[in-house]
Amino acid sequence: MTASKVISFEALRVACKNCSLDTLCLPVGLTLDDVERLDDIVKRARPLHRGDYVFRNGERFRSLYVVKTGSVKTFAPSPEGGEQVLGFHLPGEIIGLDAIEKETHACSAKVLETSAICEVPFSRLEELSSNIPSLQHQIYRLLSKEIGQDTEMLLLLGKKSAEERLAAFLLSMSKRLRKRGLSPTDFYLSMSRHEISNYLGLAVETVSRLFTRFQDEGLLKVDRKHVELLDLEAMETIVARRVVTGDRQQMT
């Protein structure tokens, strides 16, 4: 995953049935005919660039959005007047699900690097899913996944130390990139240190210090936004440490 990946207009015209993300996105479990029906309602716009908004907090909810290439961050206004980063979204991931109930976006989505986004008008998706049970099931699955990710994030921020938070974040990126056929150990972080620290609930200085410490300990190599994970097993041990300790405390 490179910092300056060029996206051609022709690449945006690839139909769902030929998309490499079909095992991650809405078409999961659909027949070829159903995928073509879904493809008919998907809108593919021009590439978006770093800083462009997919949608803004307070805007009326009209569509779900799928990251086709690149990456997007979601964030909400913080009580202090800044922003609270809610998540980083990679190719194949859907954003906007949280706005379905109130029909208003409670957060904003901003592009982190040159990205292609597929827009799926929700009214047409609802109509289509009523006729395609497998599509309706996939929407339920995605909603359940979103709830699960929110729960994991609450546990991460509420229970883990600073080093566990950063290790868990890097392992999460690694696993998600592996699912997309990309290197799980050598990748480019499109988000800044400030955005990572905001997401993890840590000071920027703490995150920078931990990156240096992990590098000194031989767990990774880092050069600005380029990260190479050298010891996944050790990283997993850091994340699991609190779990084991917590279990033992509960048994005593």
Image: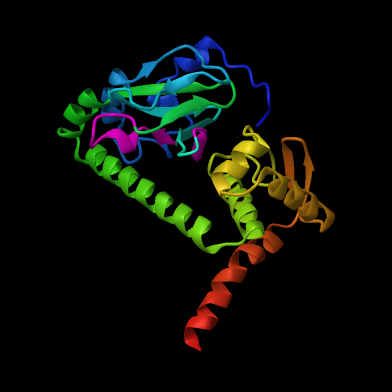
Tell whether 223 sits left or right of 169.
right
Q: In the rendered image, which quarter contains the N terminus?
A: top right
Q: Is residue 89 visible?
A: no
Above or below residue 4? Residue 224 is below
Q: Position of residue 86 (x, y in %)?
A: 47, 40
Chain part drawn in magenta: 81-105
> Which residue is more in the foreground, 206 or 54?
206
Q: Is residue 183 magenta?
A: no
The total of numbered circles placed on residues is 0
Q: Residue furthest front?
A: 80
Which residue is located at x 84 percent, y 55 percent? 216
Which residue is located at x 79 percent, y 49 percent? 212
Q: Position of residue 5 (x, y in %)?
A: 64, 21
Q: Position of residue 84 (x, y in %)?
A: 50, 39
Above or below residue 36? Residue 209 is below
Which residue is located at x 68 percent, y 57 percent? 232
